[in-house]
Image (cartoon, rainbow, N blue to C red):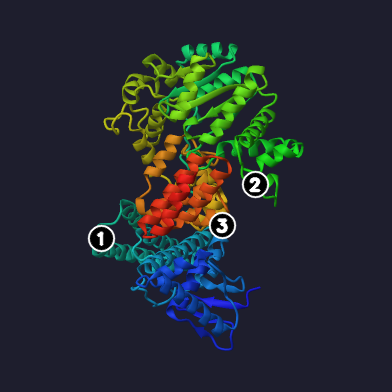
Amino acid sequence: MADWRLELLGGARLLGLVEPLELQRRVAAVLAWLSLEGPTPKYRLAGMLWPDSGEDTARNNMRQLLRRLRVATGTDLVLGGDVVSLSDRVSTDAAELEGHVFAGRHTRALALTGSLLGSLEFDDCPDFEAWLRRAREQLEALRRRAASAESELREQRGDLPGALHFAERLLVLDPLSEESYRRLMRLHYLSGDRMAALALFERCRTMLREEYDASPHPDTFALARDVEHGAVRPCNAGNRPERSLPLTVLRPPVLVGRAREWEQLEEAWKARQLVLITAEPGVGKTRLALDFAASKGRFIVFSGRPGDTEVPYSLFVRHIRERFIEQPELPRNLEPWIRRELARVMPEMAPGEEIPPMRNEGERVRCLDAYSEMIRRCTEGLDCIITDDLQFADTASLEVGAYAHARFQGAGALPRMIDCCRSGGLSSEVLTITRRMDEGGLLAHVELEPLSPDAVGEMLGSLSLPGATSLAGEMTRYTGGNPLFITETLKHLLESGSLERGWPERLPPPGRVRQLIQQRLGRLSPLALQLAQVAALALTDFNLELAGEVLEVSPLSFSAPLAELEAAQIFRGVHFSHDLVLEAVRASLPAALGALLHRRLAQQLERRRAAPATIAQHWIAGGENRRAVPFLLAAAQTDEAHLRRAEAATNYARAASILEAVGEVEEAARLKGRMSWT
């Protein structure tokens, strides 16, 4: 139960004594940081707040600061030794603001006013000043989000005065936002005050001219004309009209132009060979593998995902967990030795038990025996295993798969295997393995080419889209016969209304499918685009709860954006429809916004105790290299525990490089010594 109240908005004071305690500048800085960022190494805070002092002096100053706080309050409000945190006896208004917005308590959030740490300045502490500036911006963004969401909610309920009140609050919070002006114009008109709406348009035009030397957006002009003519209609905020694309352009109903490759697959199936399908992105590897496997019986798909390469065993662990959910009897019936080995990568298999690191190659083989046995048991009764997007898979999982294949495939104890990979996407180690298997007759390599002109015509004819078949020649020349490029071009033609009018005069340069996807992204609502951007950066860790925390909205508000992303065929469920779509979303992110989202992801994933390598990557991508070091070291230690010495050395080297760059030369040298031992 919190019995101390830390007020950080509009100033800095502590409630809990007889009289409020006004906080000194650096004390306020420490408490503000800990309340919003959580546990932090003490030396890092000292370095930020006394940047011009030597390390020993800065640490001593930090000790004295905490001692003075302890004397003033009579208790320890900051806990810990080398890593310090704020006691849970302290509640803070800034943290509550975040919590209210996340939980949808918008009016309570907006009641918490004032800038973080008020008028306190930290010009002599540039790193802290930069953090404070970002934190203030984030809190202001939260307030804007609360005002916008509450205005939308009131309008949906028919409470126009309430919607108008919060729209006015939003404009005060965001006075340079043309969208905020449009919202308020519309609500004034719907409330019966046409003149107020037109006056607001003139205010908006003046603001844009003075601040940006610009004219209003066409949407703003259009709204002003509608106000003049009385043509404005109520809007169910958040329920944007969905542009639903035909499902046939997401997955054409007929597999065309693949007779030769299908025959190759048939021959490999009879010979019980492992099949490797390679092609350029979008040519149809996955579609061919899925259709062929479906023709043979029951199958399962293990999919590599962007980000897997950073976390050893991520592909293996993800799919074993999925199989455990589908077959709950599997984990219940595991022998103790298998359970113990799985606990190295799945801690839930031995909760509370400390599994010692591997000591020799014999223990590593025992671990591989356990993991390959799990693959065998999880795939019993299936006819085929497809591993899709092999280029994203981590090396450790690929080693487990190769070991399982060598151990069981000859005896027929595993289903047949089909692997799909981008051309040129395999690592040198995996290429060496595949060459040996190919030379030994154990592997069949199927290389897919783009569709021929006849096959493009057949594909277009199967889609039941008026006007599509007549575009076969132009489509072949424009797309080079790449099926994904064909479907993305069709989506663009459908959404622009030009499909039935014939081939347009202007399109992005041939093959530039990313530009077509980005045009589609530009038509998404802001929240739908933000959700897609978080998914593109979070990768394997993405879920709606995480996205809600990063974007500071309730996950329940994602219902309409998810439907919008599916209708635009950006998402399929909560995953991207294709990895090229993911890449287009990442490319659409401005650098500054991408760095901010990476930092937010790092913070949330720290709290969730995600894989250290993943957290490190987010801190580095967010421009906070020093904060990545502890996680790089944790990842290296995990690698060592699995006798993965090359990966451990790489993580130590990255940490040492960061430490050298920030002047921590002695610690960097110690890590380099560790690398040589590894």
Residue 464 in the image: state x and y as whole percent.
Answer: 47, 23
Q: Residues within 10 Å of mark 1 (few under 14, many from 20)?
A: few
Sooner in the amino-acid sequence: mark 3 or mark 1: 1
Residue closest to the eye, 54 or 446 = 54
Disc number placed over residue 356 in the picture, else none? 2
- The first of marks 1 and 2 along the sequence is 1
Q: Are marks 1 and 2 in contact (CB under 8 Å)?
A: no
Residue linked to disc 1: 212
Which kind of residue does numbered mark 3 sit on? Answer: Arg
Q: Which of the labelled discs sits on residue 556, or is there none?
A: none
Secondary structure of the residue carrying tag 3 is: helix
675 vs 402, left or right, is left
Indicate the quadrant where residue 58 lies: bottom left
Give how far across and how far down residue 491 sits, in percent: 41, 33
Circles 3, 1 touching at the beta carbon (< 8 Å):
no
Mark 2: secondary structure: loop
Mark 2 is surrounded, within 10 Å at the Cα level, by few (under 14), some (14 to 19) or many (20 or more) other residues, namely few
Residue 402 drawn at (x, y percent):
56, 27
Residue occupying the point 40% across, 56% down: 659
* Residue under label 3: 607
Q: Nearer the viewer, residue 37 or 441?
A: 441
Q: Residues within 10 Å of mark 3 (few under 14, many from 20)?
A: few
**Which quadrant would the N terminus be assigned to in this image?**
bottom right
Reply above or below: 573 against 657.
Answer: above
**Residue 126 can be seen, yes or no:** yes
**Residue depicted at x 35% and y 50%:** 590
- Expressed as whole percent of the image width and height from the top left, the position of residue 216 reads 29, 56
Q: Residue 342 vs residue 222: left or right?
A: right
Q: Name the kind of residue labelled 2 in the image.
A: Pro
Q: Is residue 514 above or below residue 588?
A: above
Cα distance between the residues tagged 3 and 1: 41 Å
Rounded to the nearest angstrom, the CA distance separating label 1 from label 2 is 62 Å
